[in-house]
Image (tube, rainbow, N blue to C red):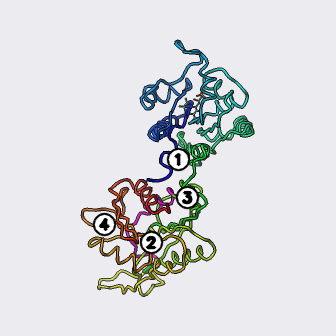
Amino acid sequence: MHKEVGAFKNKNVLVVITGSIAAYKACEVIRFLVKEGSKVKVMMSESSQKFIGLATISGLINNEVYTDLFPPKSDSGIEHVSLAIEMDIIVVLPATANVLCKVASGVADDLVSTTLSICEQPTIYFPAMNFRMWFNKATIESVEKIRKKGQTIVEPDDGELATRHKGRGRLPSFNVIINEIRKILHVNLPLENKKVLVTAGPTRESIDPIRYISNRSSGKMGYSIASICKNYGAEVTLISGPVSLQPEPGIECFNVETNKNMLDCIENQISSNHYDYFYMAAAVSDYKPKNFSNKKIKRSKSEMSIDLVPCIDIIKTVSSKIEGKLIAFALESKNGGSEAKRKLKDKGADFIVLNHHNKIEKALESDTNHVFVIAKSGNIQEIKRDHKLSVAKKIVDITLDK
Ligand SMILES: Cc1cc2nc3c(=O)[nH]c(=O)nc-3n(C[C@H](O)[C@H](O)[C@H](O)COP(=O)(O)O)c2cc1C
């Protein structure tokens, strides 16, 4: 079991939901915290209840939700005071421009603003709003004031907003939210101060300026590994073949095309950096055309063939030059186990992650995967079919130094 499991156990967490269209995203975070064993209380502004129902939240925490400054049947009438001082952390998710401006100016005209204006507990805001609201002078000044008070405001993401505009204002991803909460609670991240290099996607080998040979790798497995490592606190470098994915913010990404480009890029990285872990998930070409035609090969009626020559075995080439742990990915359509064990030795890897791709099992172009992680010691662990992000988390958990 991973050491972060249980990190949220018994933590007193107050989640404050305010009236942004991103309010529904609080459900997933609340559910996670409850599952991890936190004692979660929730407060909702009046506006937020237009976006998600009290019944949903109260069902998730199996308790009542705080909504009124003057509740009809209050025990003490001072929930805003007790809630503000009893908590290990207060999470405002999502935080509206309105609540940021109110808290910064000390306005206390409802339960949410009254609680937030007096709380001295570690407080973290996750703003979500249209970019015009985020860049509004009043919001900028309020954010500055709240940060000066020592509270945390997590910068929203750039991207497509609910209004279909592009800009800054999106609520960060679930993983980023959980990570930021972890940081405030001083929960150690398993890959803190570690450097990880991940390769992902296919490579392309050109036949002529127009055509190439490649494979069906989508890059999703490698990108998921990179995301998990980033969320575990690592500094992540991703070397990616051509895919239609975007790395998570904060991941350094190099885009390459051919097997040779990939090898050069890896060698460049290892000559100037020390990496602790290498996750080689790219599906690099095994063969390339012997000859490259500078001009587009014309269509003709006669048969033609392309001579192929082997490409360099990147993992084998790199393994002798690195000190970090090497996790190589292998794809087989049959005899996977014996092939993986042979490759483990031949390539000098610490682990082989074995994927199967055949009529029954699909690893490429799929959102899910089913793998076996085979260690140098001979230990084999199966990760049953699941979304690639969940599979990636289990792979990283298994291959981490404990
Ligand atoms: C459809 C709709 C979506 C909204 N989305 C946001 C939002 O994402 N961020 C924000 O700051 N305000 C948003 N607002 C405005 C807030 O709901 C409004 O300022 C409200 O007074 C906030 O109250 P509260 O901060 O007490 O929850 C939205 C309003 C509407 C009608």
Q: Hey, which residue is sitting farthest left in the picture?
A: 359
| Distance Cα–Cα, label 1 vs label 2 | 32 Å
* Mark closer to the observer (4, 3): 3
* Mark closer to the observer (1, 3): 3
| Distance Cα–Cα, label 4 vs label 3 | 31 Å
The earlier-in-sequence mark between 1 and 2 is: 1
Percent of width and height locating residue 325: 50, 70
Residue type, label 1: Ser
Circle 4 is placed at which residue position?
357
The earlier-in-sequence mark between 1 and 4 is: 1
Label 4 beta carbon within 8 A of ligand 1: no
Say if the magenta span includes residue 212. Answer: yes
Measuring 59% from the left and 73% from the top, which residue is drawn there? 269
| Distance Cα–Cα, label 3 vs label 2 | 18 Å
Rendering quarter of residue 181: top right
Return the residue nearer the eye: 130 or 300. 130
Q: Tell me, for residue 350, which label it has, or none.
A: 2
Element at label 4: loop
Q: Is residue 75 above or below residue 186?
A: above
Residue type, label 2: Asp
Return the residue nearer the eye: 120 or 249. 120
Measuring 55% from the left and 57% from the top, which residue is drawn there? 230
Circle 3 is placed at which residue position?
191
